[in-house]
Amino acid sequence: MSGAQAIFALRGRNPDVLTCIANLSNDLVFTPPEFANRMLDKLAEAWAADHNGSNLWADKKVKFLDPCAKSGVFLREITNRLNNGLANEMPNLRKRVDHILTKQVFGIGTTYLTSLLARRSLYCSKYANGNHSIAKKFDSDAGNIWFKRTEHKWTDGKCKYCGAHARDYDRGEGLETHAYASGLENVNEDLSGLSKEFLPITTKAYLYLSGTPFKALATGEFIEEQIFNWTYTDEQRAKAEFATQNPVKWNPYGALPQMRLLTYQMPDELVAIASGGEFNEFDLNEFFAATDSGKKAQFKHKGDVQKWLDIIRGQYAPKTVESLKTGTRPPFPYSDVRLLPYLQH
């Protein structure tokens, strides 16, 4: 057994745990270390361009904040770079590490679990003041990675802390319900445990990221000119254009998967009804609304959802008769081997 372990180590097959976590399939998207380092390379280049070529990682006064810390990969890689960059100015490793961890890197955890994970990545311990922590100057478990569970507070149908809509997140205890403290002006008073030199956090504007901008338009929260859309089509266009214009350079869009859309033709009778204008739209949230949670969960409009599924499965009666008469039937995913190469994502 010891020989096998030695071979394993000598072959250099000791993967970065944060790379492994980033490759796991889950609801949270963890940034891979490789991608984080590419972003930090660009940050250092931009800093040098704006500061007469100075080295960002050799500046002991610069402070870094990850406002949505999950795995802690950015904070870990920033700390590693600062540790190397400040070696000449601060030759004592112990003092250098304590300076960086207490005065230069800060984070706000998105959840209790990710705050522990980020501390483990940064301090080598989920407790910043624990026996195994590489930081020796903290009095609190949190160190400089803050998290406080915040319950939604609904005002006019929206949470005053994170902006979530009550119609989507005012739900039972079996599902995630806590608010994300995305507004920095709301968390300053709770960040008193962090370094006093860092506070207060101030901001001039916010950038809201959403996969459903039509909801923001529908509620009137933003006007159309304030919303920038970046779609799958834009991704593929940027990917192709970059490859054409920079054939020998690394393509930052190269990892974006190509999307294959499998569409189904709706029955002519339904198309005719929708074309009339009176019944040409419906609310997806309401149509697929569910009651209860866990094993007791069920669709509110179960019969209508089943009818919809029957239609897209080709079980609409008139269409079935037509297929029998003509001897044709459209292929469905996994039912035709010709479709399998396009179902990898």
Image: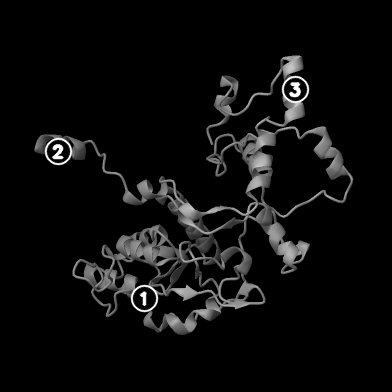
Please give the residue where the numbered disc 1 appears in the rendered image.
103
Quick one: label 1 or label 2, which is nearer the N terminus? 2
Calculate the distance from the C-alpha at mark 2 to the C-alpha at mark 3. 67 Å
Please, what is the three-letter code of the amino acid marked with disc 3? Val
The amino acid on which the numbered mark 1 sits, given as a three-letter code, is Lys
Q: Secondary structure at mark 1?
A: helix
Tell me: 237 left or right of 49: right
The disc, 2 or 3, on the residue closer to the chain's N-terminal end is 2
Depth check: give the residue in front, 340 or 302: 302
Name the residue located 64 percent from the left edge and 44 percent from the top edge: 235
Q: Nearer the viewer, residue 49 or 216?
A: 216
Above or below, comparing residue 117 to residue 1 in the picture: below
At numbered mark 3, what does the secondary structure look like: helix, strand or loop? helix
Task: Give the spatial CA distance, label 1 vs label 3.
Answer: 73 Å
Q: Is residue 29 visible?
A: no
Q: Residues within 10 Å of mark 3 (few under 14, many from 20)?
A: few
Q: Which residue is mark 2?
A: 6
Residues tagged 1 and 3 counted as in contact (Cβ below 8 A)? no
Mark 1 or mark 3, earlier in chain: 1
Residue at the left extreme of this rendering: 2
Q: Which label is found at residue 56?
A: none
* Picture quarter with the N terminus: top left
Of helix, strand and loop, which one carries label 2? helix
Name the residue tied to disc 3. 321
Residue 277: percent from left, percent from top: 88, 49
> Is there a contact, CB below 8 Å, between mark 2 and mark 3?
no
Eyeballing the image, is 302 above or below 244? below
Tell me what residue is drawn at x 55 percent, y 27 percent: 334
Q: Quadrant of the C terminus?
A: top right
> Depth check: 50 or 19 in front?
19
Q: Residue at x 25, y 39 (%)?
A: 12
